[in-house]
């Protein structure tokens, strides 16, 4: 009986979902200030634009690399004050999670863990470029993931309609 309980406990452990952050690192970082030092002579009222993207790949059976790519551009009217590009990455252990939930974790949950690290790195490099601190607003990765999923579903539905009309 004790052996049966141990075997059952062993099976439960194997089936338990597991999630662990194994490593966070900067994969790529670039800073440009093409109009320095002239841009320092102007009153600092920039237009800030941020583009972001996420990607992931399988490293091993239960390990995934997630990469959050951010490009932040600060312009003073038509002059570019600075451009920062960063690829903030992490390796995550994800085990025992079904496909739909795995996709959501890789597309939303993991990038939300990486974002504060990218934000801090961007603020640091902007400061080293002699610009005022840049505190990027939080990002709702769940909403972005939901929008992307909806867009993919609509595109798939559109492709099916197109196939039926041909």
Image (spheres, rainbow, N blue to C red):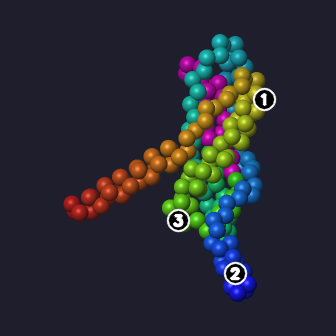
Image coords of residue 125 (percent x, y): 75, 33
Magenta-colored stretch includes residue 138: no
Residue 118 rendering spot, x and y as whole percentages: 69, 41
Q: Please provide the residue range marked out in magenta.
A: 70-89
- Residue 101's spot in the image, x, y percent? 54, 60
The residue carrying pointer 1 sits among few (fewer than 14), some (14 to 19) or many (20 or more) residues within 10 Å by Cα, namely: few
Q: Please tell me which of labels 2 and 1 falls first in the chain.
A: 2
Taking 75 as reference, is 68 above or below it?
below
The single residue placed furthest to the left in the displayed view is 165
Measure how far apart labels 2 and 1 are at the Cα level: 60 Å
Viewer-proximal residue among 96 and 154: 96
Is 74 on the left or on the right of 157, as rendered? right
The mark nearer the N terminus, 2 or 3, is 2
Q: Which residue is tagged 3? A: 99
Q: Which of the 4 image quadrants contains residue 153?
A: bottom left
Q: Is residue 117 above or below residue 133?
A: below
* Secondary structure type for disc 3: helix
Q: Is residue 78 visible?
A: yes
Residue occupied by mark 2: 5
Identify the residue at image location x=30%, y=61%: 160
């Amino acid at each position: 009986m004790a052996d049966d309980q141990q075997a059952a406990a062993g099976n439960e452990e194997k089936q338990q979902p597991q999630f662990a952050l194994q490593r966070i690192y900067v994969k790529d970082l670039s800073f440009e200030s093409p109009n320095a030092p002239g841009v320092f002579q102007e009153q600092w009222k920039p237009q800030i634009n941020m583009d972001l993207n996420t990607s992931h790949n399988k490293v091993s059976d239960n390990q995934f690399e997630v990469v959050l790519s951010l490009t932040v551009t600060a312009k003073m009217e038509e002059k570019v004050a600075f451009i920062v590009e960063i690829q903030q990455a992490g390796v995550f252990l994800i085990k025992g999670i079904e496909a739909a939930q795995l996709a959501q974790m890789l597309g939303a949950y993991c990038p939300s863990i990486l974002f504060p690290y990218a934000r801090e790195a961007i603020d640091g490099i902007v400061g080293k470029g002699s610009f005022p601190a840049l505190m990027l607003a939080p990002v709702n990765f769940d909403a972005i993931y939901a929008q992307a999923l909806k867009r993919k579903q609509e595109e798939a539905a559109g492709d099916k309609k197109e196939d039926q009309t041909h």
